[in-house]
Image (spheres, helix red, strand yellow):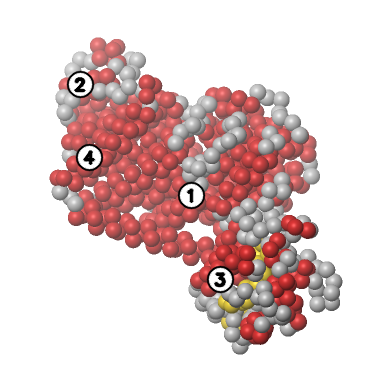
Amino acid sequence: MSMRRYRAFISYSHRDESWARWLHRALEGYRIPRKLVGAQGIDGDIPARLRPVFRDRDDLSSAADLPGKVKEALANSEALIVVCSPAAASSRWVNEEIREFRRLGRSDRIFGVVVEGDPQATGADACFPPALMESEAGATVEPLAADARKWADGRLLAKLKLLSGILGIPLDSLRRRDLQRRQRMWVATTIAAVALALIVTLAVTSRVAAEKRRAFAEELVGFKLSDLGGRLKLESEQDLLARLEYWEEASKNQNATPSTEAAIERAREFRAAGMDKRRRGDHDGALVDFQQSWLTLALRLQQDPSDRQVLFELGQAEFYISQVHMELGAFEKSERASANYAEVSRRLLRAEPENAEWVLEMAYALTNLGRFEVLRKGTSSDRALQFMQSALEFNQIALVLDPGNEAYRSELEQSHANVADAQMRVCDLGGALHSRMENTRLAREFFRAAPNDERKKRLLAYALGGLAGVQESVGLAELALGNLQESAALMEALQAEHPENVRYSQLLTNRNSRALALLAHTGKLEDARAALGPLQEAWEQYLSSEESAELRRRTEYAEFLLTWEQIEAEIGDPAAAAEHLQRALDQLVQVVETSPDLGVARERLALAVYRYWERNGELPALDVEQWLPQVAGVDPYNRGCQEINLAARLSVMRGDLPAAESYTSYLLEKGYFEPGFVQFCRSQGLCAL
C-alpha cells in the first residue's frame, strides 16, 4: 500500500480556478462504489474515497522557483492531474509542476483533463502544456486526457475517467457500478416519496380533501378536452347515443329494454368476445364486438342516466374501442373514445370521490390521455409527463383506499412504466431510468410470487424490454442486451404456452430484432448476421397474419430492415445494404401516408432518409420531404432525446453544422450515449467519445 499523503495533486492555471475547485470537490466527494472498495488497485487497496487531494491556492507569480511546500506535496502525491487549457499551456508553473513530477519517476501517473481549447491545435488555442507532451527521454508524446467539455466527455464521464486511471479500475466497471448505485439511490428516493405521499393521503381523507381531488381530476381532464378544441365536442349521454351510425336502426328493432343486470351481462359477453378476437389479431371483429357492448349499455343508460354501474361499464367499452382504434393508427377515433372514457370517469369520481374503483378509473383515463401526447406528432411532451405522473398519484390514492387490492398494486407497476415513457419524451434519462427500475422491481416481485401466472410473466417481459430501452440510451449496451434476452426468453415461453396468441409471437420477434440492433451497434457483426435469417422468417410469418394491420408493427419491421442494412454495409455488401434500405423506406412511406399522425413512424422515416443521404449523398427518389421535421431553430427543451438525435442528423444533412453541434452538445450533457448516436457523433466529428 502507498504511504504517500495525497491521493492526487491538481496542477492548474489560476485562470482556471473555478474548474480546479469543481474537480477538487468532485474527486474528494466521490464515494467509490461499495463493491469496488478493498479490491486491488494500482496503489494498493481501493479506498472508499479519493482523499485528500492537494490543490495549491497560492499565487506563484513572484516566485523564482517552485516553493518547497509544492515540491513536497508533489513528492507525496500518488498522481498528478493537469487541468488543460490555453491558460495552463502558457503557465510556467503548470509546466514546472509536470516536470517536477516526471523527475520523481512517475510519468505514468500523470493525467490530463481538458476544460478549454483544442487538443489538436497549436498556438493560442492549444490546451496541452508543452511539458505534458514531453517524455522522460525528451521525445514528443501525445497525451491522453479526459475531456470535461460538455460536447465531449462532459463532467461526469471525465471525472470517472480520472478516477479509473488514478485507482486502476477499468472504466466500464467503474461506470457500470456508479450507474447501478445511482439507480438504487433513485429507487430509494422514489420509495420514500411514495411512502410520504401515502402517509399524507391517509391523513387527508376528509370530504374537503375529496373535493380537492375531484376538482384536480376535473381540471386535468377538462384541460385536455378543451385542448382538443373544435375537433371534439364533449358529448353528453344523449349525444353519445347518436354517435354510432347504426344506432337509429338498432333502436327501432329493440323490442324491450333489458334490466341493468341483463344489460351488463350481455355487454360483458360482447367485451369478452372482442378481447379474444383482439388477442388473435382480428381487430375489425374486435371493434364490432366492443361497439355492440357499448350499444347494449347505451340503450340501458337511456332509461336511467344516473345508473353508475352501467355508466362504469360504458366507460369500459369506450376504453376498448379507443385501444383498437389506436392499434390501427386511427388516432382521431381513438382520441374521441378516450375523451368519452375520461368524461365517464370524471362523472363517476364526482359522484363517489372515495370509491377506490372510480379513483383507479381516473388513473386509467389520465394514462390514456397521456398516451396520445406520447404517440402523436406535434403534441406536448411536458403535458404527457403531467398526465402520467397524475395517473400514478391517483393509482397510489386507490391503494390507500383499498390497500389489500393486488390488482391496484399491479397497475402501480405499469404506472411507473408510463411515467418512464413520458420522461423519455422530455429527455429526462435519469428520471426514466429510475422509473423503469421501479417498474422492473415491482414486476419481478410479482412474477416471483407467481411464476406460472401468464399476466405476471408478460408484465415482467414488458418491464425488462422497457428498461433495456433506457439502458441503451445511456450507453449501457451490455446490460440492455441481457435484459432484452431475458425478456425474449419470457416471451418465448408465453408463445409456447399460448400458441393461439399471435401477440406473443410478434413481441418475441420485436425483442429479438432489438437485440440484433444492439449486436450490430456494438461491433458483433458476425453474431448479428447469423441471426438475420431466422428473424426474417419470423417477420414474414408475422406480416402474413391479420395482425400485420397494426401500423406500429409494420414500423418495427422497417426498423429491422434498417438494422439489416447497417450490418450488410459494415460487413461490405453495399448492394444488399441498398436493397434493404430501399425496402425500409418504402415500408415507412406507406405507413406514414396511411397514418400521418403516427409519430414513431415519422421518426424512423427521418432516420432512414438520413441513412440514404449518408450512403448516397442525395435524398431518395421518393416524396419524403413533406414528412421530415423542420429542425432549424428547434429548441431542445421539452423534446425527446431521439427527436434531438434526429434533428442533429437532419441538420448535418441540410448543411447546418452549428445546429448539429448544438443538438449534439445538448444530448451529451443529458447523458445520452445510445450506440447509434455515438457512431453518428464520431463519424461527423461532432464529439470526441
Vertical position of residue 597 compared to residue 43: above or below: above
Query: What residue type is disc 1 on?
Result: Asp
Q: Secondary structure at mark 4?
A: helix
Query: Badge 1 is on which residue?
Result: 428
Q: Are marks 2 and 1 in contact (CB under 8 Å)?
A: no
Q: CA distance from mark 2 to mark 1?
A: 47 Å
The picture places residue 209, in percent across and down from the top left corner, at 19, 46
Vertical position of residue 171 compared to residue 332: above or below: below
Residue 160 visible in the current orientation: no
Mark 3 or 1: the one toward you: 3
The picture places residue 536, in percent across and down from the top left corner, at 64, 40
Q: Who is closer to the viewer here, 32 or 139?
A: 139
Q: Are marks 1 and 4 in contact (CB under 8 Å)?
A: no
Q: CA distance from mark 2 to mark 3?
A: 73 Å
The picture places residue 191, in percent across and down from the top left corner, at 35, 59
Query: What residue type is disc 3 on?
Result: His
Q: Earlier in the sequence, mark 1 or mark 4?
A: 4
Q: Which quarter of the image is occupied by the N terminus?
A: bottom right
Q: Earlier in the sequence, mark 2 or mark 1?
A: 2
Mark 3 surroundings: few (<14), some (14-19) or many (≥20) residues within 10 A: some
Query: What residue type is disc 2 on?
Result: Gln
Query: Badge 2 is on which residue?
Result: 302
Q: Are marks 3 and 1 in contact (CB under 8 Å)?
A: no
Query: Badge 3 is on which residue?
Result: 24
Mark 4 or 3: the one toward you: 3
